[in-house]
């Protein structure tokens, strides 16, 4: 590598390393040079955001069996799509996938420019770059956590792309990183360079204990040469917020559970169990919030059935779960804000782990 830039020799080392070490993955073709199906690239890359490859593998296989192409997905109900996503978290990703599938199906072809792709719900710069390079073999860059880590170490960059400014460069930090990414992608083999870097970050230039001896860049890596690998990338100040709350499982006398849509702290755009912020161990008696849904004379018993822990974005959640048995008969009609769900089907109905953890205590 010369002038701290990725030269042709380094890229050739990277490709050779990848050809020898590429893992078999359900979204990867045996021929690493073959263009991919843009739909499969889009689904796999969206699933892989915030989620480990080992977890995504089975989800992707199951998904592609049920929704093998954009038309099959576009025709599906949102509740079914969410069920196939259940467990991957960040449910807005699944909702955006469905919205985008419906737009793409209407236009009858997958977009092939960055501008068009980034205009679609849920497709950002990273996913657009992955689709354009892996499916269409365009010279388009990607930048994800793996590439950030590699570039930070290779060039000893002591700032993150999310930093507002850095002391060592006049350009915005995010642009410095994207420029390195664009340089790697400025080649007819951009598809392989991008994918190889993702794989290198996942398997060799790992967050902890990078295997520098097996790295195609070890002769050129600044952090490695200076024995400062552990200093890069610099750590970001991670703010976690504790949130303590109560979840209500309100049951009718015909064994249906109340689900509500909207007006809740979490899952604003899907049906969830009623929940609210509360101090620890404050669940004695009937919380006032329950009276929004049932009158005091309709309540037969109130019982704390346990607690669970959960994480949603920056929230570190601890929730008490309150079971409220009522003498109400659930109305058969449905509306957009309230539904009564048969207890036997509740596990299928609630498409988020937060509710499933509460229901598991029942
Ligand atoms: S030599 Fe080590 S730190 Fe540098 S890029 Fe390779 S694995 Fe990462």
Image: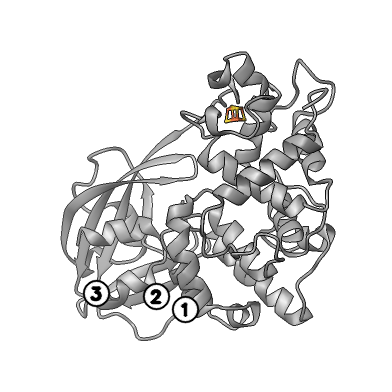
The answer to whether the beta carbon of the residue marked 2 is less than 8 Å from any atom of ligand 1 is: no
Q: Nearer the viewer, residue 107 or 144?
A: 144
**Residue tagged by mark 2?**
339
**Residue tagged by mark 1?**
335
Count of marks, rendered view: 3
The answer to whether residue 66 shows anywhere in this view is yes
Locate residue 254: give its quadrant. bottom left
In three-dimensional space, the C-alpha distance between marks 2 and 1, rounded to whole angstroms, equals 6 Å
In three-dimensional space, the C-alpha distance between marks 1 and 3, rounded to whole angstroms, equals 17 Å
Going 63% across and 35% down the picture, which residue do you hit? Answer: 216
Going 77% across and 27% down the picture, which residue do you hit? Answer: 1
Going 22% across and 40% down the picture, which residue do you hit? Answer: 281
**Residue tagged by mark 3?**
252
Say which element carries label 3.
loop
Mark before the other along the chain sequence, 1 or 3: 3
In the image: residue 19, left or right of residue 35: left
């Amino acid at each position: 590598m010369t002038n701290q830039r990725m030269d042709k020799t380094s890229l050739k080392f990277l490709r050779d390393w990848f050809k020898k070490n590429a893992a078999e993955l359900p979204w990867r073709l045996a021929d690493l040079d073959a263009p991919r199906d843009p739909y499969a690239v889009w689904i796999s890359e969206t699933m892989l955001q915030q989620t480990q490859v080992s977890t995504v593998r089975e989800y992707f296989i199951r998904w592609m069996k049920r929704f093998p192409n954009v038309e099959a997905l576009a025709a599906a109900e949102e509740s079914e799509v969410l069920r196939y996503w259940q467990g991957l978290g960040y449910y807005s990703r699944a909702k955006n996938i469905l919205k985008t599938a419906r737009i793409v199906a209407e236009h009858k072809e997958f977009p092939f420019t960055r501008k068009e792709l980034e205009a679609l719900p849920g497709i950002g710069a990273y996913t657009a770059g992955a689709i354009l390079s892996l499916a269409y073999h365009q010279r388009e860059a990607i930048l994800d956590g793996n590439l950030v880590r590699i570039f930070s170490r290779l060039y000893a960059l002591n700032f993150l792309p999310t930093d507002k400014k850095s002391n060592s460069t006049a350009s915005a930090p995010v642009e410095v990183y994207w420029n390195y990414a664009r340089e790697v992608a400025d080649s007819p083999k951009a598809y392989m360079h991008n994918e190889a870097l993702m794989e290198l970050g996942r398997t060799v230039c790992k967050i902890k204990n990078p295997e520098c001896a097996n790295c195609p860049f070890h002769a050129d890596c600044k952090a490695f040469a200076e024995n400062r690998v552990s200093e890069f990338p610099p750590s970001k100040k991670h703010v976690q917020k504790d949130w303590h709350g109560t979840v209500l499982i309100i049951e009718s006398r015909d064994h249906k559970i109340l689900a509500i849509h909207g007006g809740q702290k979490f899952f604003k755009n899907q049906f969830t169990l009623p929940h609210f912020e509360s101090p620890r161990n404050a669940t004695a008696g009937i919380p006032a919030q329950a009276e929004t849904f049932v009158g005091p004379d309709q309540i037969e018993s109130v019982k704390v059935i346990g607690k669970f822990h959960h994480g949603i974005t920056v929230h570190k959640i601890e929730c008490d779960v309150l079971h409220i048995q009522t003498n109400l008969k659930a109305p058969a009609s449905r509306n957009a804000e309230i539904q009564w769900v048969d207890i036997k089907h509740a596990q299928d109905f609630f498409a988020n782990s937060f509710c499933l953890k509460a229901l598991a205590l029942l």
